[in-house]
Image (cartoon, coloured by chain):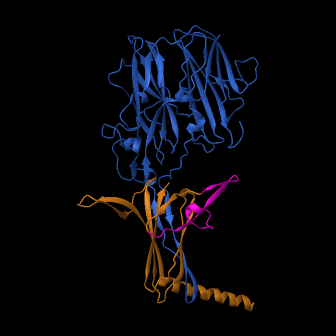
Amino acid sequence: MFRLHALFASRRTALSGAVVCALVSAGCAAIPALARAQTMTPAGTMIDNVAAMGFTDRDGPVSLASNKVSLRVQEIVDVSVETLTPEVEVEPDTHNQRLAFRIRNLGNGRQAFDLSVSELQGDDFDPQFCSIIVDWDGDGVLDMTRDKVSNVTPELAPGQAVIVWVSCSIPAGAVHGALARMLLRAWPSVLRNGMTGPVGNDGTFIVVGPNLRGGSGGGNNGGGTDGGAPPTLTTFATFKVGQVNAQLIKTQTVLDVAGGSRAAPGSIVTYSLEARFGVGANARQVKISDAIPAGSTYVPGSLAVDGAALTDAEDGDAGRFAGGGVEIALGDVEAKSSRTVTFKVRIDPLGSSQ
Amino acid sequence: MTKTLLLALAAAGLLAHAPARAAEATLTSAVFKEVETRGPDGRATMALKPAARVTPGDQVVYVLTYRNGGEKPAEGVVVTNPLAQNLVYAGPADMQPPLVSIDGRTFGPLASLTKTSAGVATKAVAADVTTLRWTLAQPVPAGGEVRLSFRARLK
């Protein structure tokens, strides 16, 4: 039997059999870590101040109001790039090998971001034909009928995030153990041509945020995986050449009740578990299991494999929801293939016992 | 009928009277950004500059100026400033700190206020403040001017 477990938080996966199961912990952060309330006042908002006063003179009490003084909130543009797959094992002479990143709009206006991928100088080998695929429909699952190769993100609301994959070919000559470190940069499209003036949302002026200001390269380094600081090894996503048996890569996307991406009570979290099997995978009776995280509840009927829905009951199909988790039996899987399991949970109301 | 008419007349009289008295007193509100400037001796001083381009996180200073343009002192002067919801109170900007309120009814120093959420009382924090109030202890003489100020941060 060949069993892949996905565990939450930063715990490594359990595995059985002689199978390498690399759980990408960064993609499996516990739900509270995702909760980044977006509280910045939107660009273009007017903030009015009127004071009032009262006093008494010889004719009795008097009250009056001051003039109104107004501030117009200008736009901060900023972005973060987060590595969801710090290290992915790949084999020589393979295609469509993917690293996942999350791009988040940290400004207070709606903006799209230009994307570019580069490779750290002086690493071991050069991945080829790299393209950037944007999770255009925002479901966290790569599906080329709905997602697309693009060097720009959709327009993101303040605080909203989108997943982006860097997909490359691994050259035949890449030797075992070799590393290729890839850096994804995001830059506000509105600043593409060094535009200045009132080009922000609602005609506001743009102020560049800290992630885009810092770092080397005269400010052009901003918005990279490194968040603007000089690149460090830990902030790159890395292709590592090895003999891949199998690995499980987990990513998540959040849809809140307002249509944003805030992790809050009522938000729906879609988990994607991508099981990849390399040439070394002579995989029989593959099973994937994953527990529903504490503080959330499985959304009935949301289990699917490669986009095809499965029932929750233990019946004729491959999946079931039981005992606080999902289990999917994929059966025998061919080498050099991948399967993607998706399911949804809803974040419980605050104070509910779990 | 007569009563109604009298009331109406009284109201009209008040309305006619109020602007005349209000004109004697003025309250102006202005907003500035605090900017550090260095003098020739290299010493840093804070200066108030017009708050033109502000963004979330910026700190601004509101200055309220009351001028008693009348001929008599004004007693019991109370100035109230409700905070816009996109502002967080960031403390006094001069030697006259206001009393603050988190509900618009009870005023006191911030440390004296508590808030209750789901039956649990906790100390109020600056982000809870909704209203500022200054009560002037001394009458403001005729022709006198009083300046009050506070700092706020943009959410």
In the rendered view, tell whether residue A16 sits above or below residue B74: above
The percent coordinates of residue B138 (x first, y second) are: 50, 81
Q: Is residue A292 left or right of residue A66?
A: right
**Direction front: furthest residue:** B112
In the rendered view, tell whether residue A102 sits above or below residue A167: below
User: Which image quadrant is residue A25 in?
Assistant: top right
Q: Between A116 and B37, which is closer to the camera in this rendering?
A: B37
Q: Residue at x 51, y 9 (%)?
A: A279
Q: Which residues are magenta?
A: B95-123
> Which quadrant does the N terminus of chain A fall into?
top right
> Which quadrant does the C terminus of chain A fall into?
top right
Q: Is residue A81 left or right of residue A314?
A: left
Q: Is residue B23 visible?
A: yes
Q: Is residue B96 magenta?
A: yes
Count of residue discs: 0
Name chain A's colour.
blue
Name chain B's colour.
orange
In the rendered view, tell whether residue B57 sits above or below residue A130: below
The percent coordinates of residue A330 (x first, y second) are: 65, 15
Q: Between B64 and A138, which is closer to the camera in this rendering?
A: B64
